[in-house]
Amino acid sequence: MRARSGLPLTLALSAAAVVGYASGIELRAFQIRRVDVPVLPMGARPFTILHLSDVHLTPNQHDKQRWIRELALLRPDLVVNTGDNLGHAAAVPAMMHALEPLLRLPGVFVWGSNDYFGPQPKNPVRYLLPHQGKRGSGPPLPWRDLRTGMISAGWRDATHARFRLRVRDLDIEVAGVDDPHLQQDRYPLVAGPVDPAADLTLGVTHSPEPRVLDAFAADGFRLLLAGHTHGGQLRVPGYGALVTNCGLDVGRARGLSRWGPGGDPAWLHVSAGLGTSPYAPIRFACPPEASLLTLLPRTAPG
């Protein structure tokens, strides 16, 4: 009987070690995901995009703020922020401080549910259950203050907007929608075929819901950026994500893939993001990340 008594203790200690690692070490192990995307016209010079998402910042997360500020040292050509910046009602000054060096660069953004509404306590097990399309909301957040700060610095709000940017020597057509996670996306407001003269066509959304990705791809947008999934947040080593918290398949929970029909579909990049809800501060086998996309010329016309 004694020989068996050590097994439950061993399992308990192992579980405690995993939780301690996931909530302590990995949660602060910020990484940069570097991805090459062959999406530019033939002959174009490489162009870099810093993709930020799901910061879920609270005022006391000083290490995260410092790390975000240092991303400016990468000197990206464009910053794209796909939402869920705020994790606390008093986090706008901290978020502006974190972004301040990046706000000197060209940037665009859309909003996520955790820009509009604060997190709320819930059973973490619910995160592992199938997506039901029903979403509660916490207390309102001061997203308008954050919007004012980013726009005042020169960034463009792509929420239900479509516009052109000239960055360096590229003509970029941008379109974005409000958060599909809250079912606030209204793609018809930005619908229509892309201009074939544009050097880069960029579709931006917080949650990578297939209906929105399909619409972007059908209109000819070649690069689609999204966040929301946290990369699965709790990944099984050797297997990957168990959930995406949206309609996207788990194989695309983070990183680069192709999206759409035909022989030359759009490129989709999903950021695993930099944070979590303060009520579920755990990441496992899925370090917090920002992504540096290096856009390269296509190898064939199209």
Image (cartoon, rainbow, N blue to C red):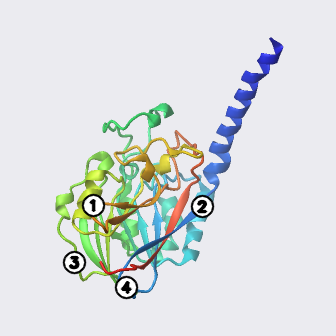
The answer to which of 19 and 112 lies nearer the viewer is: 19
Q: Which is in the foreground here, disc 3 or disc 2?
A: 3
Q: Earlier in the sequence, mark 4 or mark 2?
A: 2
Q: Which is in the foreground here, disc 3 or disc 1?
A: 1
Picture coordinates of residue 25 (x, y %)?
68, 49
The kind of secondary structure element at disc 4 is: loop
Q: Earlier in the sequence, mark 3 or mark 2?
A: 2
Picture coordinates of residue 80 (x, y %)?
41, 68
Mark 4 sits on what residue?
A: 42
Q: Is residue 263 left or right of residue 15?
A: left
Can you say whether 49 is above or below 33 in the image?
A: below
Mark 1 sits on what residue?
A: 261
Q: Which is in the foreground here, disc 4 or disc 3?
A: 4
Say which quarter of the image contains residue 260.
Answer: bottom left
Residues at marks 3 and 1, CA–CA distance in whole angstroms? 20 Å
Which amino acid lies under the numbered mark 3 shown in the image of this protein?
A: Asp
Residue at image point 34% right, 45% down: 247
Task: Specify the label residue 195 is tagged with.
Answer: 3
Which amino acid lies under the numbered mark 2 shown in the image of this protein?
A: Gln
Picture coordinates of residue 98 (x, y %)?
53, 64
